[in-house]
Image: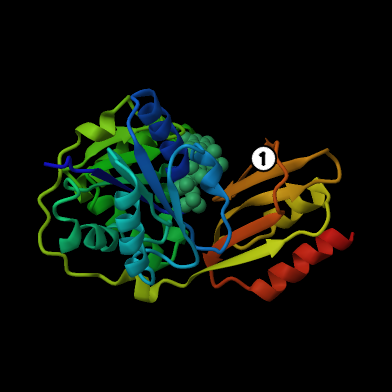
């Protein structure tokens, strides 16, 4: 009988640390000589995180739609194709931060995969700072994050470096009340013990009554392509004035003050820059609620024209 393929669904709101975790998992899988494939789902039309996946690992990217809402069928055919063309030990699915994990699970549990997959595991990443300050989020986003916590087999409470020990304790208590069954870990930079995610047990799931968080989510993405370099200080001034409803920015920027291209990451007010060694298109992806794309476009153009 053909061996069954393990499936791991990485869930968690925008910027919570999913790609950071995936990088670590893939490294371990490579060391263990296991054959794995990755499915990445990005809300926008451009790929920013695909560098996290080694070239030898089959990667399927699903763009411009969230697995849970618009491209479920595409996910199904993507999985079929991966199974057909590879002799896999595991598949890792990194969902968009806007995905409801159960809706993704529904696709995996489709009858056509019964013989092929072991029981899928949901691994949820939670940005502890985002959780602590969740009152500023819209009701829909708060509900989505809660659902991501509630349905996890493994809950990784990440970025604990950003809050005090006392806060970590009380937040842990709150989260365990929402999901008492998950294997729960506190981490920095999604650093979990080796293979810990493979040893989690599947939850007994009651019939899922869809909450349809997605219907009320107003998350939008906007992609801006820079034509020229910009000033770092002016860019940071612009960042500081952004509304709190812009949850995530990532992309490539060429700064006047420095040489070469930088991978820029911004999550919940914290910017991060990493030098990029290869030439890439200067795409910047912004994700948020009620994005005023015309205004953002004009402001970024302004930065280029200064
Ligand atoms: N301070 C701090 N930053 C972290 C930690 N973990 C991840 N980050 C940073 O947070 C940002 C987002 O991390 P990612 O792994 O890209 O998050 P993601 O969930 O894949 O993000 P999306 O793809 O937008 O959904 C990056 O700049 C990381 O370097 C942490 O424990 N502490």
- Residue 244: give x, y in percent of width and height: 57, 60
Q: Tell me which residue sits at (29%, 41%) in the image.
A: 87
Left/right placement of residue 265 relative to residue 98 reads right
Whether residue 36 appears in this view of the structure is yes
Q: Is residue 162 visible?
A: no
- What's the image's color scheme? rainbow
Q: Is residue 294 above or below residue 195?
A: below
Position of residue 129 in the picture relative to residue 279 (left or right): left
Residue 276: name its quadrant: top right
207 relative to 222 in the view: left or right: left
Instruction: Specify the quadrant of the image occupied by residue 223.
Output: bottom right
Which quadrant of the view contains residue 299?
bottom right
**Image quadrant in which the N terminus is located:** top left
**Count of picture labels:** 1
Check the picture and name the quadrant holding the C terminus: bottom right
Q: Residue at position x 71%, y 72% from top?
A: 295
- Secondary element under disc 1, as helix, strand or loop, is strand
219 horizontally vs 111: left or right:
right
Residue 204 place in picture, x, y as percent: 9, 50
Front-lying residue, 195 or 83: 83
- Residue at numbered disc 1: 273
Q: Position of residue 145 (x, y in %)?
A: 35, 56
Image point (36%, 30%), residue name: 29
State the residue at coordinates (40%, 28%): 30
Q: Where does the image place residue 122, in percent across and percent down from the top left?
A: 26, 48
Which is nearer the eye, 139 or 229?
229
């Amino acid at each position: 009988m053909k061996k069954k393929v393990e499936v791991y669904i990485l869930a968690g709101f925008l910027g919570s640390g999913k790609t950071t975790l995936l990088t670590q998992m893939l490294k371990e899988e490579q060391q263990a000589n296991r054959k794995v494939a990755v499915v990445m789902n990005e809300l926008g039309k451009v790929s920013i995180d695909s560098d996290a996946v080694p070239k030898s690992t089959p990667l399927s990217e699903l763009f411009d739609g969230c697995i849970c809402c618009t491209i479920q069928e595409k996910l199904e055919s993507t999985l079929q194709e991966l199974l057909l063309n590879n002799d896999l030990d595991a598949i890792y699915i990194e969902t968009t931060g806007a995905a409801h994990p159960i809706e993704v699970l529904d696709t995996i549990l489709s009858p056509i995969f019964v013989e092929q997959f072991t029981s899928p595991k949901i691994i949820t990443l939670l940005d502890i700072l985002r959780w602590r300050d969740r009152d500023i989020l819209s009701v829909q986003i708060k509900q989505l994050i809660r659902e991501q916590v509630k349905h996890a087999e493994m809950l990784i409470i990440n970025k604990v470096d950003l809050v005090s020990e006392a806060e970590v304790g009380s937040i842990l208590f709150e989260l365990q009340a929402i999901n008492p069954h998950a294997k729960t870990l506190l981490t920095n930079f999604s650093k979990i013990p080796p293979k810990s995610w493979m040893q989690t047990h599947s939850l007994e799931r009651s019939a899922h009554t869809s909450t349809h968080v997605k219907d009320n989510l107003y998350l939008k993405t906007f992609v801006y392509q820079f034509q020229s370099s910009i000033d770092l200080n002016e860019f940071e001034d612009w960042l500081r004035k952004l509304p709190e409803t812009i949850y995530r920015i990532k992309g490539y920027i060429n700064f006047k003050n420095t040489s070469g291209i930088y991978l820029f990451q911004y999550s919940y007010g914290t910017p991060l820059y990493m030098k990029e060694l290869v030439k890439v298109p200067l795409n910047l992806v912004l994700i948020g609620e009620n994005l005023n794309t015309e205004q953002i476009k004009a402001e970024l153009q302004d930065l280029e024209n200064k």
